[in-house]
Every structure is written in C-alpha cells, then in structure tokens.
Amino acid sequence: MSIQEQYRSRAKELLGEGSVKMVIGYGVGTTATRRRPIFITSPDETDRLVLDASCRTNLAGYLLREGLLADQKSIAVFLLPDGVRALNILAAESQLATAQIVVLGFEIKGEEVKPLEGTAAGDFSAIIAERKEQRKAQPSHEMAVKLEEMTPAERFAFWEKEFSRCIKCYACRAACPMCWCRRCVVDNNQPQWVNTSSHTLGNLEWNLVRAFHLAGRCVECGNCSEACPVNIPLHLLNGRMTDEVLTAFDHYPGADEQQEPVLASFRKDDPETFIL
Amino acid sequence: MSEPFEPKIVAFVCTYCTYAGADLAGTSRLKYPPNVRIVRLPCTGRISPMFILKAFQKGADGVLVSGCHPGDCHFDHGNYHARRRWTAFNALLQFTGVPEERVKFSWISAAEGIKFAELIDSITEEIRTAGPFEQYHKLIAETGSAASV
Ligand code: SF4
Ligand code: SF4
C-alpha cells in the first residue's frame, strides 16, 4: 500500500470513528506540483487527500482559524517535522492545546515520502532532537556566506535592492503559522511604527520587524519565502535569526511544548559581546 | 561654507540607571557633547527595538540604548530580557548592513556619570567621523518627508 493510501485510510478511520471532526491535509492544486490545503470533515472525502514530495507547506497555521478548536473536539493534521515544531511553539504560546491535535506525521527525504511514527506532538521529540543537531551542523546558505563577507555598505545595498521590491502585501505574514497576532504592529497607526508609503523605507522596517518577531519562533518551514510574490529571500533573514538563537542561547525553536519562548525568558549568564 | 556636521544621536535609557547616570554627569558639571537627545523609559525592558527603527526613520545618525547593569534592574529582570532582544536585533541589524557604529548598547548605572559622559563623547566622535547616515537618509528622502529629529 502506498503511503498516500495508508494515510488516506488512516484519515478515513479517524473521521469514521468520530475521534476527529476534521482532517487538514493536502489536495491537488492548479499545477502538477502545486498542493493546496484541504479541510475534510467526512470519511467519504478522504480520497481527495494527496501525499507526495510536493506536500511541503506547513499546515499548522490553519489550526488557529478563529473558533476552530473552541468546541474542544480534535482535529487531525498532516505535518512535516517543522510543522510539529510549529505546533509545539503554538502550544507553548498558549494558542492551542496539543491534546486536541492528532498529528499525521511524515517526512520527505529526497523525493521519497516516509511515514513518521506517532500521533501526539510529543511523540516526535526524537526526530526533532535529531533535526536540531542537523541544523547546528548545517553549513550556511551560500548567499548568507557571501553576505557575511561583504562590507556593511554592500550588505545594506543588497537588502535595499531586495526590499525595494516588497509591495507590503503581507503574504509572508498570512502564510506564517507563527504570525498569529490579531493585530500586527505593522497595522498599528498610533504610533505609526512602519512607514506606510510604498517606498523602501517602510519595506525595510517591515521586513526587519517581521524577522525580529520571528526570532526564536521561526521553524524555517519556508511558507513565507514561498508566498512572497516578489521573491525576497526571507529565508536568509529567518536563517540568520535561527543561527543567532541557536549559538547564543542554544535554542532550537519548537523542540517541545514545554520550551520557554526564547525572547520571553533569560539566563543570568546569557552571553553579551557587544554591550559597552 | 557649509556647516560642520553635527551628528544627531538618540539615546533610549532606563530611568533608574542610565538616566540617573546622565543626571549625575550633569550635576557633576561633566562636559559632554550636546548631540544626544535622551528619551527616558521606565525600564530597560521597555526599550523596544521599534524605538531604534523609529529614531532612524526620523533621521537619527546614531542610536544609543542603555540600561542598568545585569543584576541591578529595579524590576529585577527587565534588563535580562532586554539583553536577549538586543542580541537578536543587533545580529539582524548587522546582517542587513546597518553599520556597527550607528547603534550602540551599554550598561550605565546611576553612579556612572563619568562613564555616561565619556561614552557620549566617544560615540559622538565616532559618528562625526562616519558622517551622516546617508544610506538611511536617502530612504527617508524617497518618501518625500524630511529627516526631523
Ligand atoms: S517565518 Fe517563514 S519559515 Fe519561519 S515559520 Fe514563518 S513561514 Fe515558516
Ligand atoms: S510577501 Fe514579500 S512582498 Fe509581500 S509583504 Fe512579505 S516580503 Fe513584502
């Protein structure tokens, strides 16, 4: 039985026995490799589910749709390991209770999709721990290395050019499972923190604020870079923030649901190298 | 002849330590450059990175963020939280090419009037040498508004 069939029948079972009220998974999209999220509530619909190497979107954010979890019923969701990490962070930030979530975990190795053992968020701690070690050993992105080698003026010019294309559509925010604030600071107008005009100044401010607010919370799922209509390399900013929290605070975002948010906790002996 | 360049520096300080340190510098009649505009906050932990961006948005050439030494926070741990935020935000600023001399972080206690005066002296000099923050001023000019610190 293919993994897709396996997961379809799993979903059918869950819905059929009534242990979940909904399955959030992937369905066919508008092109051969595009997948779109689907929300299934009947066991008769489970053959719409697709599971293949194109299923890369992090679906965790859909769980926060207003009122969805209010009735205390359970929901099953297809998640890659990054998605489980997102789930852990959302639980740590009191946005949901993992007890209500049934994880349909899988991973993609090359072009191969593999099942992951477990149903509760906590069942995936071994693979997440493994991921942490991989992330620590992972060489920096080629462009990130180039950027570090540039002078500050060159770096500024690089980002100025990138951010000049931003249209403040906030698709990056909408696509991010961690961007759950009801009212984003960028929408605040008293005071107006981020310049609203369609110029590079506000675009730069927005992108700095976005990256900063995701420092230590971003799971590097790639939803934002994928969503950005003008291909701003958001993953470089996110990656730099992840590097920083990993090296400075040994913080791997979403390790488990007990993990304290890195910018809402501290250690008295946290490193400080730049403070005069 | 054009006027010599006078840097505009905004200092975000906590009222219990650095502000009191600045006060001590004043009452001790220590001289320091008048280039710094001090904004007083109730705690180091209240100094949001948004303030730094706001200062630059309004045309600042440099920003100083300063609070109580670790262990000295009036509210016990506001500065420990701040330190983590500064660490992440500082890394982000460096990564996006904001020159290191434009944003400084320091601990200055209520007893360190001399440290305050000397630090203002040295960062003013450093920014005077670096010149106006042209890269940012250009972005402000594009929006049609003028730098207004
Ligand atoms: S910032 Fe981007 S990569 Fe990070 S969690 Fe959000 S969508 Fe995923
Ligand atoms: S998705 Fe891209 S263009 Fe849209 S607001 Fe985000 S960075 Fe800007």
Image: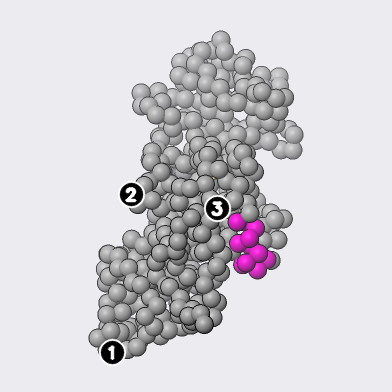
Three-letter code, disc 2: Gln
CA gap between label 3 and label 2 equals 21 Å
Q: How many marks?
A: 3
Quadrant that contains the N terminus of chain A: top right
- Who's the residue at 38% across and 75% down the image? B36
Mark 2 C-beta closer than 8 Å to ligand 2 = no
According to the image, label 3 marks what residue?
Answer: A200
According to the image, label 2 marks what residue?
Answer: A190
CA gap between label 2 and label 1 equals 38 Å
**Would residue A150 appear left or right of A85 to someone viewing this image?**
right
Where does the magenta region start and end? A150-160
State whether residue A214 appears in this view: no
CA gap between label 3 and label 1 equals 43 Å
Quadrant that contains the C terminus of chain A: bottom left
According to the image, label 1 marks what residue?
Answer: B29
Picture quarter containing residue B15?
bottom left
Residue at the outermost right position: A111
- Who's the residue at 44% across and 51% down the image? A194
Picture layout, residue A172 above or below residue B79: above
Residue at the outermost top position: A44
Q: Is residue A153 magenta?
A: yes
Three-letter code, disc 1: Arg
Chain of the residue where label 2 is placed in the rendered structure:
A
Q: Position of residue A34 (x, y in %)?
A: 67, 28
Q: Position of residue A140 (x, y in %)?
A: 67, 56
Q: SS for tag 3?
A: helix
Chain of the residue where label 3 is placed in the rendered structure:
A
